[in-house]
Amino acid sequence: MLACLFTLAVHAGEPLQLSARGTVQVAFTPGDEAATLVIETLRKAKRQVLVQSYSFTHKDIAQALVDAKHRGLDVQFIADRLQDERGATSRVAWLAEQGVPVWLDGEHAAAHNKVMVIDNGTVDTAVITGSFNFTHAAQYRNAENLLLLRGHPALAEAYAANWRRHRIHSLPYRAGR
């Protein structure tokens, strides 16, 4: 069990303070297999995956999301609006082509969250967050960090609520805008 308190800004009001609980795995890149940790966690997902991503180019993570969708999971994705302009490197269009609902967040200067909320509302809930963009560069070239937080339902719900707030003002992805 963690010996600290998590504090995170849930909305424009007071930050939410939660007692630490659950387990934490941390990966640092380059070096640690952060992408593998993400993919393995997605393969174990049972119900839902909510994603917010600034940059998304990692083919294997994209495939793991599509595989989850094909297993019947509710997979939804919010990307920064500029993902629509990154052409061949972004996997956002491919996700949409594979049936994953994708929205573009243009409300902010940058939709810079890097978050996955997995199986919110269940005993298997998990949150993936950190500086790690879901990209090949984040795994192999950049100095990044990734946290996998399991077994903390209140934390997962806070991240899911933040995801829903961003979803409200995001626009559905349409190819060739």
Image: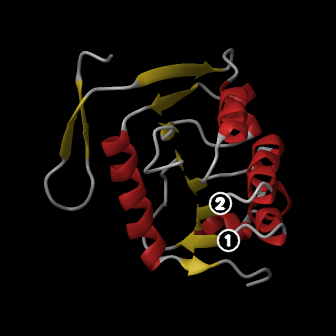
Residue at x 45%, y 31% (from the top left corner)? 149
Q: Which residue is mark 1?
A: 101
Disc 1 crowd rating (10 Å Cα; few below 14, some 14-19, many 20+) is some
Asked whether, in this view, residue 109 is left or right of residue 94, the answer is left
Measured from the top left, where is residue 77 in percent x and y? 62, 62
Identity of the amino acid at label 1?
Pro
Mark 1 residue element: loop
Q: Is 51 or 46 nearer to us in this picture?
A: 46
Q: Which residue is mark 2?
A: 75
| Residue 71 visible at all | yes
Q: Are marks 2 and 1 in contact (CB under 8 Å)?
A: yes
Give the Cα separation between the discs numbered 2 and 1: 7 Å
Residue 10: quadrant of the picture: bottom left
Measured from the top left, where is residue 170 in percent x and y? 51, 76
**Disc with the residue nearer the chain's start (2 vs 1):** 2
Q: Is 116 or 43 nearer to us in this picture?
A: 43
Disc 2 crowd rating (10 Å Cα; few below 14, some 14-19, many 20+) is many
Q: Is 151 or 116 nearer to us in this picture?
A: 151
Please state, as top left, top right, bottom left or bottom right, where the C terminus lies in the image. bottom right
Mark 2 residue element: strand
Please state, as top left, top right, bottom left or bottom right, where the N terminus lies in the image. top left
On screen, residue 79 above or below 58:
below
On residue 51, the disc is: none
Measured from the top left, where is residue 121 in percent x and y? 43, 50
Identity of the amino acid at label 2?
Val
Residue at x 53%, y 48% (from the top left corner)? 119
